[in-house]
Amino acid sequence: MIPAGKRAAVVRALDDEGVDYVVTDETSGREYTAVATFPLPTAAVEPVLERLREAGIDERTYTVIVAAETVISRRFEALEEEYAEESDHGGDRISREELQTKADDLASGLGTYVLMTVISAVIATAGLLLDSPATVVGSMVIAPLIGPAMSAAIGTVVDDEDTFRRGVRMQILGVVVAVVAATVFAFSVRSLAFVPPGLDPLELAEVSERVAPNVLVLVVAIGAGIAGIVSLMTGVSATLVGVMIAVALIPPAAAVGIGIAFGIPRLVLGSGVIVAVNVLSINLSALVVLWYEGYRPQRWFREDDARAAFLKRAAVLVAAIAILSVFLGGVTYESYVASTTEADIRSATGEELAALDSELELLELDVERGGTIPPLDTERVTV
């Protein structure tokens, strides 16, 4: 909508950008005198909006961006080619305004967010105790965790402190709610004997794999963060990518709850490290990708503030991940030592049996290692 006195400047700006447009007189009697409508390639939205701001179209007026299914015009095809060549990052990146809107859309209301997180955590906990991968996967589909993670990164690069703080608060709330819900549910099913008495969760494959995380969890989290932010930037549906982010957060949070309910410090520590590393890595990867893609504040004089915030928050995330990676590296090394130690013991046992009697056969060999934090000690070998 074109305010009074801005019509000539807006038309001149659109002509300069080579955009086809239709200008219709506005007769509602308010401060607007006309409405301009024009099709744009995706890559052209942000530069054209910048040009219109210079002409006097700002947030006090109405600017509505609508996704068009199809545009049939050779002139439009030429405009697409022109902007695709000018764009440093290709022609599929949406504008800053669209990105912020998508992030806001993903951030559901507080009540809905908490409820869906609780349901997701309870289902994940049940899936872990049932040792059912299908149930665990199902819990991730309904987890609403992608919005807060993406909002925090977007708020940083566009210098929107409210969006950043809301994203951080919602992420912390989501993790706390998931752990509490999982703990209460796991304690309830244990107290009510809905699981076999004497059940050791560490004997369940779905639980045991989260006791000793290695450095590969970083790959999962970083990949999830990159996929999440790229899905928003390109306008692709974020539903499936949200599942990937939930993969990194919901099952380990449920495992923390199980560890608390069953009194297993190793499980609480290992799964807690997975949750922390994944949250930090998702935020860092999303933040770096957004900055690399050139998203900046709406006003140029705030770019220095945004750059300072980006550097400070990225440094904090990197430092925190580096500290936690010491634990991951220790666990990875411990797994290597455990496997090589068992192989050496098995080889030596085979040689000893062969020396005693060629007809002896090794039926089973069990190596028990004790401790909570690596390095673990070999306590007993049963042959």
Image: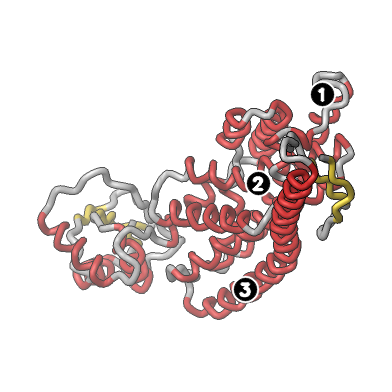
Query: Looking at the picture, which amino acid does disc 3 mark?
Result: Ala
Q: Residue at x 37, y 65 (%)?
A: 57
Q: Residue at x 27, y 46 (%)?
A: 68
Q: CA distance from mark 3 to mark 2?
A: 26 Å
Viewer-closest of 71 and 123:
123
Name the mark nearer the viewer: 1 or 3: 1
Q: CA distance from mark 2 to mark 1?
A: 22 Å
SS of the residue under disc 3? helix
Which residue bears the numbered disc 3? 309
SS of the residue under disc 1? helix
x, y percentage for residue 114?
Answer: 69, 38
Residue 57 relative to residue 203: left or right: left
**From this viewpoint, is residue 30 visible?**
no
x, y percentage for residue 355?
Answer: 77, 47
Binning the other alpha carbons within 10 Å of mark 1 as few (below 14), some (14 to 19) or many (20 upward) gives some
x, y percentage for residue 187?
Answer: 85, 30
Please give the label number shown on residue 249: 2
Tell me if label 1 and label 3 are in contact, CB under 8 Å. no
Which residue bears the numbered disc 1? 189
